[in-house]
Amino acid sequence: MIEATGLSYAYDGIPALADVDLEAGPGAIVGLIGPNGSGKSTLLRLLYRALTPQSGSVIIDGVPVQALGSRELPRRVAVVAQEPPAEISLTVAELVLLGRSPHRSSLQAYTGHDHRVAAAALHRVGMREFADRGVGTLSGGEKQRALIARAIAQEADHLLLDEPTNHLDIHYQHEVLRLVRAMGVATVIVLHDLNLAARYCDALVLLDHGRVVASGTVRDVLRPEILGPVYRVGVRVIDDDGCPQLIFRPDLEEPGPGAETGPGSPLLSSDHPLSPSLEGFDGPR
Ligand SMILES: Nc1ncnc2c1ncn2[C@@H]1O[C@H](COP(=O)(O)OP(=O)(O)OP(=O)(O)O)[C@@H](O)[C@H]1O
């Protein structure tokens, strides 16, 4: 269980996050969504103690995160951050094996069990044949999957991921999120793709300018009247076998400089036969 209450943070006096609450119960996946610069990564960094909040608290299974020891924290919380891995000179197998470090003392060698857990994690992300490759030689998506394998090998009860589907093709976007679901641990995940968020998250927290604009179930948050003003796009929600999915239109009221091909423009007016119907789209207010 991850409980964050009243979190605020400022970089060099410039506020990035203000009075944010979040809760991820056992097995629940909470999606952090919001525009660029809205504070998602900052919030995640506060959750895994890379940053210390100026006010508020983060509690992991009843224990303040600040009170967890440096070995206890990674045993409880696995992180897939946006930063590229420092372990660029390692092989993929060695990188994934690092996920076992919190489970042994620094003098202890990795056990057969550690190797089996690491190999199984690599297999789960479809990377077994990459075991001997250098991390530095991987594509962006392969690297991302190797980092997710490391988090799986860590066997922590809490998982924090910052845009884990970045660089992944559509198959692996779904595969990785299915894996996250199957791990069944308390998860907080930053996602830009709202349709993936709708499909895989149990709850969402929408940030804008460092504040929570909406939080709750997927259906509570992914509403055109909420998303439109925050993302400055037109939004339509459709139902895909019970899962809400979104279709977006660019901001119809404030075309950017030189934008001449939007609906209503001389090149593509809304009654042009090639212009798709705008019915059902709620433009931003
Ligand atoms: N190290 C830093 N020093 C100063 N300001 C920072 C730093 N990191 C982030 N910020 C600022 O804090 C705000 C929130 O940034 P953050 O990275 O948390 O947003 P985000 O929602 O994760 O963005 P994105 O979707 O673009 O990844 C932004 O205004 C950003 O410029």
Image (cartoon, rainbow, N blue to C red):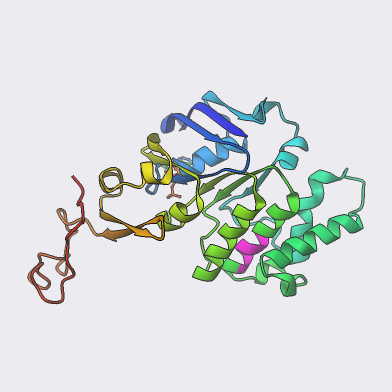
Name the residue at 59% across, 71% down: 139
The spot of residue 35 in percent (x, y) is 37, 48
Tell me the quadrant of ligand 1: top left
Magenta residues, start to end: 142-147
Give the quadrant of the N terminus. Answer: top right
How many labels were placed on the picture? 0
* Residue drawn at 10 percent across, 64 percent down: 264
Q: Residue furthest front?
A: 241
| Image point (81%, 48%), residue name | 101
Horizontal side of residue 106 vs 224, given as left or right: right
* Residue 238 drawn above or below residue 185: below
Instruction: Assign the magenta stretch its main secondary structure.
Output: helix
Residue 141 lies left or right of residue 121; in this view the side is left
Horizontal side of 25 relative to 116 (left or right) equals left
Q: Is residue 71 left or right of residue 62?
A: right
Above or below, comparing residue 131 to residue 149 in the picture: below
Q: Is residue 275 above or below residue 284?
A: below
Q: Specify whether residue 55 is in view.
A: yes
> Is 157 included in the stretch rendered in magenta?
no
Task: Pick whichever, 169 or 45, lies toward us.
Answer: 169
Residue 119: image location, x then y, percent: 79, 64
Give the camera-side residue of 202 and 113.
Answer: 202
Tell me the quarter of the picture where residue 237 sits. Answer: bottom left
- Quarter of the figure with residue 175: bottom right
Looking at the picture, tell me which residue is in the foreground, 180 or 7: 180
* Residue 50 visible in the picture: no
- Please state the horizontal and vertical placement of residue 238, each as a whole percent of the image: 32, 58
Q: Please name whichever residue, 220 or 260, is drawn nearer the observer in this view of the structure.
A: 220
Q: Quadrant of residue 260?
A: bottom left
Task: Give percent across and percent down for residue 145.
Answer: 63, 63
